Amino acid sequence: VKAKRQNFFDQVYQVVKLIPAGRVTTYGAIASYLGARGSARLVGYAMNAAHAYPDIPAHRVVNRVGLLTGKPHFNPPCEMIDRLTKEGVEVKNDIVQQFEVRFWDPAMGLDI
DNA sequence: TGTTTGACCGGTC
DNA sequence: CGACCGGCCAAAC
């Protein structure tokens, strides 16, 4: 808790790792879950650095509208869509379809 | 040490 | 409904 700032990136990574396959969450939701509401940008910033960690499913993190804002940051940009599609998440025009259904709130845990 | 920048969000118009 | 504006906080320069 005290070293929250130091571990902020790790905190984000931990949450992202918890995202179930076939589900997506938002930067804001993660930030809010970490008690840093309004600091969604930091989550995105953390994700940018997350490239060094292969175990982090960054493709399951999108913005609030379900838009794949992080797409250009992927190795081949299509990698993000590819992975999501393989997990059963329908993506069209860089936007997650049925986003409300696919959305997974960290605070909600492993709900259906 | 101060400034700039970002894989964003919420409220307003 | 879509477009716009201000704010948020850490890292990089």
Image (cartoon, coloured by chain):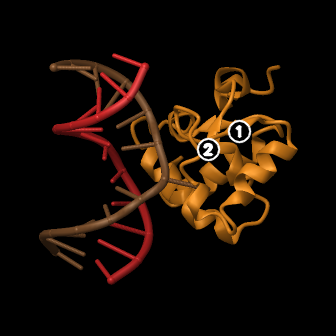
Chain colours: A orange, B brown, C red
Q: Mark 2 touching mark 1, by CB under 8 A?
A: yes
Between residues A105 and A35, which one lies in front from this camera angle? A105
Spatial CA span between label 2 and label 1? 6 Å
Image position, residue A7 (x, y; %):
56, 57
Report the residue at 49% width, 36% height from top. Answer: A35
The chain that hosts pointer 1 is: A
| Amino acid type, label 1 | Val
The chain that hosts pointer 2 is: A
Between residues A61 and A111, which one lies in front from this camera angle? A61
* Label at residue A33: none
Image position, residue A61 (x, y; %):
64, 44
Report the residue at 72% width, 67% height from top. Answer: A53
Residue A9 in sight in this render: yes
- Residue named by callout 2: A94
- Residue named by callout 1: A91
Residue A7 in sight in this render: no
> Where A37 sits versus A5, above or below?
above
Give the side of residue C13 with respect to residue A101, left or right. Answer: left
Q: Residues within 10 Å of mark 1 (few under 14, many from 20)?
A: some
Q: In which quarter of the image is residue A97?
A: top right
